Amino acid sequence: MNVPIPPLGASSNAALLTFTVYTLAVLGIAWLSSYLRRGKKFVSEYFLGSRSLGVWAFALTFAATSASGGSFTGFPSKIYSHGWILGLWIGSYIVVPICAMGLLGKRLNHVARKSGAITVPDVIRDRFESPQFGLLAVLLIVFFMSFNLVAQFKAGSLILRTLLEDSVLFDQTSVWFGNAVGALGLANLTQFQGPEYLLCLIAFGIAVIIYTTYGGFHAVVWTDVMQGLVMVVGVLIMLPLAINQSGGLENATREMAKMTPPVPVRAAIAPEEGAELTLSGGTWLALPETGDVERLFRVHTTATIDDSSREVELLELTAAGDIQRVLEHNPADAVRRDVSFTIVESSPYAYGDGKQGVYVSGPGPSLKEASGFLPLSLAVSFFFMWAISGAGQPSSMVRLMAFRDTPTLRRAIFTVAIYYSLIYFPLVIIFCCARVVLPGMDLESDRIMPAMAVHLTDTINAGWLAGILVAAPFAAVMSTVDSFLLMISSAIVRDVYQRNLNPKATEASIKKLSYLVTLVVGSAAMCGAINPPQFLQDIIVYTGSGLAACFLAPMIYALYWPRSTQFGCMASMLFGFGAHLSMYVAGIFQNNSFFSPYQLLNLDPILIGLFASFVFGWIATVLGPQPDEQLVQKYFYRSKTQDAPAAS
Amino acid sequence: MSKDAPLAKTGDLEFDPVFLNARREAIVIFLIWLAGLLWCVPCCYLLGFKENYNPETMKTILGVPSWLFWGIALPWVVADVLTVFVAFFYMRDEHLDVVEGEQE
């Protein structure tokens, strides 16, 4: 073993086993769900679980859907790269459960029941008796969610590939698979990302598409429950191990305080007589320095050095503590001192280079941003992002329409609050400890979650446990993908076909169409991910914040403001969409990239979008026509004589 | 948002209590979010954003940097307590209609 990060080999077989068991379990759930569905109204059962979710199902499906793959790959990677400041980055999770479920939950469920609405566009359409508003909502949902779905498929495949990449069985299978694809004359399918990626995409995609198509909403919810439990168990197992490995949390924080950010460098290897030299990723190279201190470099990706190419990307550790830990935890021969090289170019951190204390204070070190990772204005933006924009996600809203009764809602809010408390702050702690336990992974921080899982379980000789820990990220992606898939197909089947094109469609034909559309949408997204877009995380951020900018304000007005009208709420939706989009388009002109949006007043586009949506929606409503009295009476009033029975 | 509907109220209609309760609860929840924003962000900013942070004099509480403890960890506990209060003692239970044919 020549690297401090153990090869994932043994535990990757565990990961492969976990993935297989997992897939079988979700397929079983889908079968059960479809079995139990017999005899119920198809559309409301398939897309909304007949509004019958109890506490556990409701709480965990809500939590698992909003915790996308990002929580277990992007988030740990950010913690590792920027340190304790991530505590503030996710700060608003302290109120996410109560905001995301409590702001709209009771009233949305109530209004949806009044009209029998099954989807979010349904609610909007019925509330204003406006087919065109309903179709606008469908259009926006399909637009944003299709992009997001492709990105999530890619995320799922990448996670799976990371988990399995050192498993021998997986390697053999993907070689065979690559040849098979080539033999079929489809070799160009593997040229984008290689056969491993394609194999993972197909395995992941087919599993998700089958169980979502076959099982519908209930299957999605039950698998969410299972996935949600896997996530929290994974975190709670890792937490004590990580603290223990880093010598206690106090020690970890003290060590982090002394750290200075590493420096990515390009180095030229000095010529060696005729010989070819292969440096595998993760190898440590030492460069003698005057005195007894050595400079220590880590090879980023495997590189072959020959006459045609002498350069290699390295990461130089700059903190004495990190260097010492690497030397202590590796056998003497694991660090190569026989390779001589000179540094061609170094690209130090834009914020934090050479400074101690940046990992334990704000705004956190940043490789690219001179103002640091999280300056004040972004900290404010993120407080809106998670809590407020979380409330504005249509995928959350549809879950709010599915709980059985108000005691369920109240208990679920409590359950999710505990659940998030057990996941998010502990994740910050675990991956701060990872900085101390596994130094030098800054350039490959996307792998920190599986690397940490494997390292921690190896220390207690329980490699099999890693299989369960690494299941958490793909559980998170799966639970997001399945619900988005169902959102898109419900929008098409229910809101476009059943309500506009063919209101008299029979149940049997709706059923066939639902299966077909779910299957086609899922397969299309999977094909879109064969040559996936770059900027994975950026797409997820753009679509998530865009949906909130479009849906939150109109929904709040429609539910809580009797004066609201179709005119005002459509204006609100369109202005939200336009303002948010224009920040991204302005980014093309200012930063030459759609995905580095213009930050008006240093704020994230989500704030601009929400602001425009609320303000212009309000103005349009007040200046626009009066609402229809019949609708106001239906949704806001009841007759005095009618005494509602007390809730059970 | 609290403007009443421009509705000629006929004597036998009243606001649906589910609507009134839900709106009141939503306002309280929004205020909790606002309180969270006003506590967490300024607290972390004032205590934790330092140009030159001296690792020797850094304060920690339970192993967490003290600014993060006061700015996030403590309000996290407070927010959970408030969530319990709202969920179990403040939110009312309501009668929600059953949509025909959906639940057994």
Image (tube, rainbow, N blue to C red):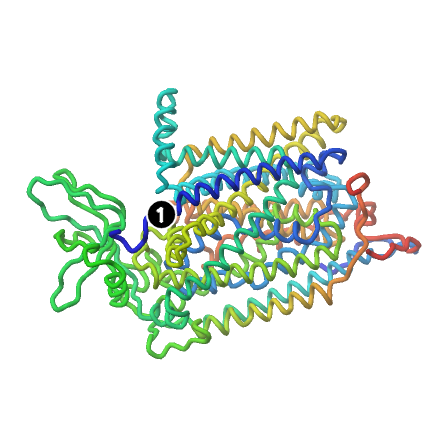
- The residue to which callout 1 is attached is A8
Instruction: For the C terminus of chain B, give its image quadrant.
Output: top right
Quick check: A226 left or right of B51? Answer: right
The reply to whether residue A5 is in sight is yes
Pinpoint residue A309: horizontal percent, then vertical percent.
16, 40
Q: In the rendered image, which quarter is residue B46 located in?
A: bottom left
* Chain letter for mark 1: A
Front-most of residues A176 and A54: A176
Quick check: A385 left or right of A619? Answer: left
Residue A228 lies, with reference to residue A27, above or below; the image says below
Pinpoint residue A151: horizontal percent, then vertical percent.
47, 41
Q: In the rendered image, which quarter is residue A331 located in?
A: bottom left
Residue A85 lies, with reference to residue A647, above or below; the image says below
Furthest toward the front, the residue is: A461
Front-most of residues A533 and A227: A227
Q: Residues within 10 Å of mark 1 (few under 14, many from 20)?
A: many
Q: Residue at x 67, y 56 (%)?
A: A412
Q: Residue at x 73, y 42 (%)?
A: A50
Residue type, label 1 = Leu
